[in-house]
Image (cartoon, grey):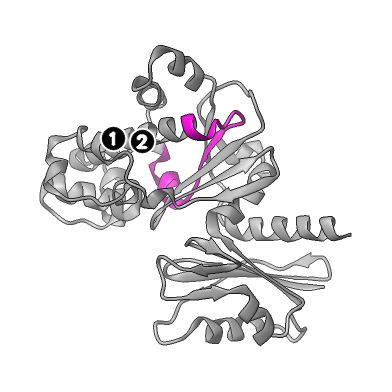
Amino acid sequence: MNVCFIDIGGTNIRYSFFYNNKRLSIKKKEIPVSKSFNQILNEILKEKETIVTDLVISAAGPKFNQTIKMTNQEFVIDAKKIKKRFNLINCFVLNDLEAAGYYLNKIKSNNKIIIKEGQKFNNNQILVCPGTGLGLSLIINNQKVLSSEIGNSKFLNSEFLKIDKRLIKLKFSKIEDFLSGPGISNLYEVIYQKKLSTSEIIYQLSNNNRKALYVADIFLKMLAKFLAEISLIYLPGNGIFLSGSLIRELEGFIDKKRFKDNFLNQANQSHRNFLNLMNINLIKKEHLSIFGCREFFNSIQKDSS
């Protein structure tokens, strides 16, 4: 059995081969503007002389009938067409946060940072990643993973706009316009009338720049409020987990007491007591979607044996 796991991002593709129970290292390839996904995939699969028999692909975007139309690329990933074109035994397509969710319970404690302690009351978890957009998956009973498109919803926009009156000047259409890498850049621009990239803001943070610190504080306050609202929807009694490079970059600027207060503040007393049971963790480990593709494939193999 020769398997390839692929995670497609906004600018790069990461992939790993699994031959005869030996996993090779994760590789990265920049996505050429001029090439189709099939052309890129063909190049990847030809890297090894041994024929790839199975393929698992994760990508950002809603999944319908094993097809994903990506939100940050012009690619349409259709598992049935790919399976036929490359003569594969199996081809599976997963939303990127769905894939990462399959790996969540394999992450060791030394790769987690506790933001807020809590008490387990069921086996459900949520995984949240503010990245190019805002991704979320729900892990039910430590087994079933459901993806969502919550980043494209609007249910908290009015609450976010109350945090700083200057935010009203910019028309935000969805939650990920606030809670994402581009979102933190949007916040800086509307508050200070100057456009900085996410990486520039992170650099300013590392120098304790006053403006960047304020924007990070606003961002983290919004994130805490968002986590509280979705916790009341999904009831993640086994933990809330934050992942991705952006949140790892912001980790040193998270005041845990302040984050907890913002997480609890908007609820009434009975719901506040309920939210207080939930633990919040930041995941330090990278490449969760690739590892999740492997865990998903392993679970499929176990179910079929």
Q: How far apart are marks 1 and 2 (CA)?
A: 8 Å
Q: Which residue is drawn at 40% across and 67% down?
A: 72
Magenta stretch encompasses residue 91: no
Considering only vertical position in the picture, is 288 above or below 271? below
Q: Residue 253 carries which label?
A: 2
Give percent across and percent down for residue 285.
Answer: 57, 48
Picture coordinates of residue 178 (x, y %)? 29, 47
How packed mark 2 is, by other alpha carbons closer than 10 Å (few <14, some 14-19, many 20 or more), is some
Q: Decide which of 120, 63 is in the foreground and name it.
A: 63
- Using the image as rendered, state which of residue 214 and residue 9 is in the foreground: 9
Q: Give the range drawn in magenta.
A: 232-251
| Left or right of 127 on screen, residue 199 | left
Q: Give the side of residue 40 with respect to residue 192, left or right.
A: right
Which numbered marker is on residue 4? Answer: none
Residue 110: which quarter of the image? top right
Q: Residue 217 carries which label?
A: 1
Earlier-in-chain disc, 1 versus 2: 1
Visible in this render: residue 281?
yes
**Callout 2 amino acid:** Phe
Q: Quadrant of residue 266?
A: top left
Vertical comparison of 135 with 48: above or below = above
For residue 240, above or below residue 263: below
Element under disc 2: helix
